[in-house]
Image: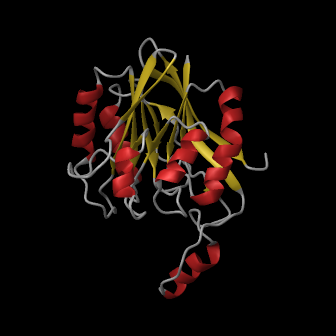
Amino acid sequence: MLKLLFIGDIVGRPGREIVANRLSRLRTEHAIDFVIANGENAAAGSGITATIAKSILESGVDAITLGDHVWDQRGWENDIIQTDRVCRPANLPKACPGWDHLIIEARGFRVAVFTVLGRTYMNLKADCPFLAADRMIEQLRAQADAIIVEIHAEATSEKQALGWHLDGRVTAVLGTHTHVPTADACVLPKGTAFMCDVGMTGPYASVLGRDVRPVVERFLDGMPRRFEVATGDVRLSGALIQIDPSMARAEKIELLTVRQSG
């Protein structure tokens, strides 16, 4: 069996530090072959930079995916072209720079990964995630032994619908963006691992990774405030998937959570 860890949204310095401090040991303890991480909140909670992407990859991550904050950091639209092993969502307009997928390899087994943005309650211009996923699967089927699809979306219904739509055609459909790990990890009937949200890698004593007080105050009075990245109760959260290489089916999926102090 092969094992793949998909790490949920890395939020700011706390998220980056726990990946740097704990991932190497996790790879050894769980005999993990592949590590994919969503890095769209890695730079102060919004976006990513070339320097930060390099540091995450040097921590032991094999591939970095991005989401709706893909263009938040100034200059990233130029840096993404020159940064290896990072891909932007596949259903952005074709004119957008950067790779729309990545292929990583271990033990002679090739894994392709791509992200689609949901469109329900999301503000970034994107094509239909269902049709984009169909297109990407057709494109990648001959290039990889397994395909991992990340759906970066707000609505659980949209994530679940995509999981059922792709069941049996990909090895996993994994949700990100909402930062709260869900309790629905399962292998669908035709062998596709699914989870609505794999959680956040960052500070859980927070509101989705941000300091509590300004967020609560914003809900109370509606006034704009700066939401700094929080620092307490830092955890690494992700989905650990066991893959049968003979059929590229998922045999098992479970939530993996590690505390910084653990």
Would residue 126 be seen by someone viewing this image from the given angle?
yes
Q: Nearer the viewer, residue 258 or 10?
A: 10
Can residue 9 be seen in the rendering of this structure? no
- Percent x, y for residue 200? 57, 52
The residue under the point 38% across, 19% down is 145
Q: Based on the displayed image, in which of its 4 quarters is residue 20 positioned?
A: top right
Tell me how the rendering is colored: secondary structure
Quadrant in the picture for the N terminus: top right
Identified at 59% across, 72% down, the residue is 228
Residue in front for this viewpoint, 47 or 79: 79
Observer-nearest of 101 and 240: 101
- Kindly indicate the quadrant of the structure image that contains residue 12: bottom right
Taking the spot 52% from the left edge, 52% from the top edge, the residue there is 51
Residue farthest along the right direction in this orientation: 261
Residue 121: give x, y in percent of width and height.
34, 63
Q: How many marks?
A: 0
Q: Is residue 259 above or below residue 101?
A: below
Is 196 located above or below residue 101 in the figure? below
- 235 on left or right of 126: right
At 35% from the left edge and 25% from the top edge, which residue is drawn? 168
Asked whether, in this view, residue 120 is left or right of residue 228, the answer is left
Q: Nearer the viewer, residue 204 or 86?
A: 86
Residue 77: percent from the left, percent from the top? 34, 56
